[in-house]
Amino acid sequence: MRALRAGWAVLVDLVRLTVVRPVVEGRPRTAGWPTGLRAIVFASLTVYAALTLTVVVAGPLRRWDDLVVTGTGATVPEVGVVLCSGASVLALALFQAAAMHLPWWVRILSVLLTGSVVVIFVLQASLNPLNLVPAALGLLVIVVLVAVRWRSDFAWGEFVVVAAALGTALFVPTQLAANASMVPVDWRGTSLEGALQTLSQLALPALLVAGAALAQIAVTASFSAVAAGTRELGGGTLRVLAVVLVGVAAWSLVRALVDHENSVQGWVASLSQLLVLALLLVPILWVAGRPPAWSDLDEDSTRLNYLVAVCTTGYLLVSPVLTLLREVVRLTGPAWLFALLDGYTVVTRQDWMPSAMRAGVGIIGVLLALPAARRGRPWTAMFLTALAVLASFDLLRQTPLRDWIADTVPQFAGMLTVALLLAGGWLALTGRLSTQRAAALGCGLLLCLVFPHRAILDDPISAALGFSGIGAVLFGLVWRLLTEGDITREGSPSWPVPARVLLYCANALLAVASTAYVALTRQSGTVLDITLYTEAGDWLLGTPLFLTATLGCLAIAVVPRRPAPVPMDQPAGFVTR
């Protein structure tokens, strides 16, 4: 009976630490919000819920509703066109209303981006210049409002005026063009597709971070399980579980070795990257004077993930504005400026550009994180080092060595399992396998077992929704919506709370609108296929998180550490910040 109670306590703690606490700590706090902000958030969340439901019922909608044809030949249910168009305008209005009270460069970028979206959306109405008058008036209202209100505090009327101006600028010209057309043409699908192609660039950071949601949960669940088990279970039960864990880890390793999908080149590439990463982590830990603490490894990485995502996709975020500027310069500007903008476009579209940006961000990030490592906080530098190593090896895929960069997550997990088992055996033989070290090794082994299967429910959910990969995307977006509201709680003079709240809502709406559009059109492999970005986020942010956590567990077990007090919800013997 005592064992059942202990097991139930472990399960309750696991759910509390993995699911309940992130949601409770990550939800927005409405206390102190100015008048009207709650209503705006409520409206945004209502549209978010409607779009989420649209993703779930996309298949029936395509069968029952009238289909609207887009410029690329795709078809969208009419209700989906209305919802996605409305969500796009709402998200853009939220972004523009927030930008009024942000630094000058954000205000300029927001106006340019809004202008780009309007131009693309009303392009089919340009045959008659008079049709563009409402678009020009709407943009003029936004520019004047930004110029007048940038020093003022947030007021809910700003959002209303911006939304009305955007609605006028986007929908009136297209309706006038449709009414004047001699042949009945429905421009809604083409306009929506063009607008989303521009707005989806803004959703890239959110989609990348959403792709890492399952990775974050896998890491948190592994650490929470070990923390709860060490605290609640007796010594005998823990020893039995340790033996079972070692046996399952060994069996999983054998399966990975005999799996024909895991090529020899993949094992060599995985080993090479882990060796390079381990060698680079040694000086970081030496600078820190200690290995990472338990609380370091289980730290919420959302803010760092967003920073990395924004920095690695920054050249894409400004591309709509630069593309529009290039076309204007082609007609009116100097030849040298057009050549410069055209060269930028050519370079940023190269296959190696994303990996180069990630490697650069990782290397620069490590240098910036070294001061924190000197103060005994090495986790950020470790994570960015893992990012830089993975991205640098990705660059080799553009060379004749690409066949030898065929690594997979199961192969990383297999190599790390070998290292953890060898470290555990060595510590046991030398009589130094303490409770603290055993818990660290156990956590690393559990993570190696859990992480390769983090998306185990994606296939059945995606099959039920009728679109490959959409289950993991939808889960990641909803999870991030529930757990990222903490960024809205505290503001600064440059980034006040109302602006943070509006950006939080705009970010969520853009991502889910793009997801709904892809689910409704059933298109994959296109520029609007958000599953490509979430998969990239899983690799870009999720895999470095896994490597950092596992190697950190190994370091906790084998590197001496300074003693420090232990919080109640962590295993005995673990050192925290």
Image: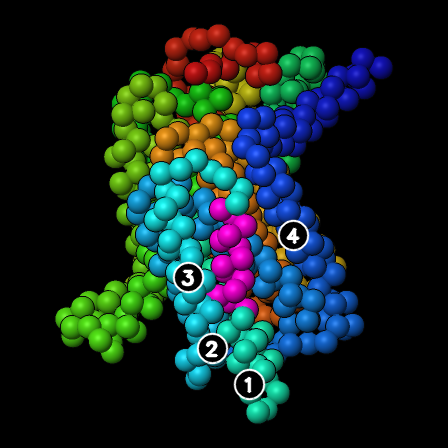
* Mark 2–mark 3 distance (CA, rounded to whole Å): 14 Å
Going by the numbered disc 3, the residue's amino acid type is Leu
Name the spot of residue 216 as percent of width and height, x first: 54, 38
Name the residue carrying label 1.
180
Judge from the rendering whether residue 494 lies leftward or rightward of residue 283; answer left or right: right
Judge from the rendering whether residue 469 lies leftward or rightward of residue 415; answer left or right: right
Instruction: State the mark number for residue 70.
Output: none
* Mark 1–mark 4 distance (CA, rounded to whole Å): 32 Å
Asked if the residue at tag 4 contacts the one at tag 2, i.e. Cβ–Cβ closer than 8 Å, the answer is no
* Mark 3–mark 1 distance (CA, rounded to whole Å): 23 Å
The residue tagged with tag 1: helix, strand or loop?
helix
The residue tagged with tag 3: helix, strand or loop?
helix
Instruction: State the mark number for residue 47.
Output: 4
* Mark 1–mark 2 distance (CA, rounded to whole Å): 10 Å
Q: Which of the two marks, 3 or 4, is nearer to us in this view?
A: 3
Instruction: State the mark number for residue 139.
Output: 3
